[in-house]
Amino acid sequence: MSDITSLHTALVSRILEGEGQASPEIRRAAFDNEGLAEPVRTFVDKVAHDARMVTDADIGTLRKAGLSEDQIYEIVVCAAIGQATRQYQNALAALSAATGRN
Amino acid sequence: MRLAILDHGHGVRAKAMFALIRVFSGHPVVDAVKLALYRPSFYRGGGLTQEAMRGPSDWSVADRELMAAFVSKVNNTEFCIAAHTATSALAYKDGAKVSAALADLETAPLTEPLRSTLRMLGKLTRENNVDVDDISRVLAAGVSEQQIKDALAVALAFNVTDRLADVFDFAVDDSAAIKAGAKYLLARGYR
């Protein structure tokens, strides 16, 4: 049986605590989709909830705010993994509750 | 792609690999590979995806590829829909089954355990949450607790990958390259 727990934990600590060009604080906030200032706040929420609708102009806004491509890259990766992780943990909690009840 | 670094910012080793891929596959390097080889010390999601898609599981590789295609369909991520529809169809040796599942889950010729699992993954992907009743229905369809965990791992991997593909604007390859990619994913996996 497959167990991705350790791979998932290692991935999350790599993107949040590993070497990067965005600060650990902004990476953590992008992961949590919480506590960010504009224009990053709106962008990260779009990555989390409506990634399909992200446009060139959205990336342009971040560039104009002074973010480098590598910083944008890191923020996107953290936002994507953060949202998928919340979904995953919500579902695992429901699974624990369901199997505990059965 | 929307960030030039993902097209051109790779190190010497990755660039050499791209040259080899172009020569031996006869196709351009797909954007998913460019992303995977960009700063692997930072993201490197391939290990998790490999374990979710090819690690030991009571779900077949074809089932898990269908889950990946299905989650991508819910996210409306064109690149991943195309890649994993093709890979699932090749693994099942049944393209019609995969097309039917993506067109209408309720009427497609699937086993009830797989159908109920896909239904749950669809809700999780759309609404970011499932409740105890959603999971209980999957268990009642005969899916084991471990199979649910394995399916959730696939959804985790593709809810990450779909977002990255959409935000970085992965190009959708032509059908010959998609077929070649599907063969590669079945032979070699995601590492």
Image (tube, rainbow, N blue to C red):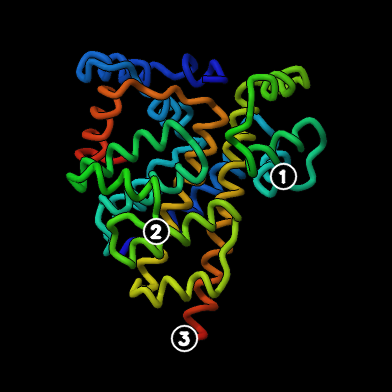
- Pick the front one: A38 or B79: B79
User: How far is disc 2 from disc 3 in space, using C-alphas?
Assistant: 26 Å
Q: Residue furthest right?
A: A37
Q: Chain of mark 3?
A: A
Is B55 positioned to the left or the right of A8 in the image?
A: left
Disc 2 marks a residue whose amino acid type is Glu
Q: State the mark number for residue B15.
A: none
Q: Is B63 situated above or below B82?
A: below
Q: Looking at the picture, how far across and down is residue B9, in whole percent?
A: 49, 17
Say what secondary structure mark 2 lies in: loop
Name the front one of labels 1 and 3: 3
- Pick the front one: B2 or B101: B101
User: How far is disc 1 from disc 3 in space, using C-alphas?
Assistant: 37 Å
Residue at the spot 79% in from the left edge and 30% down from the top edge: A39
Q: State the mark number for residue B106.
A: 2
Disc 3 marks a residue whose amino acid type is Asn
User: How far is disc 2 from disc 1 in space, using C-alphas?
Assistant: 39 Å
Q: Looking at the picture, how far across and down is residue A9, in whole percent?
A: 51, 55
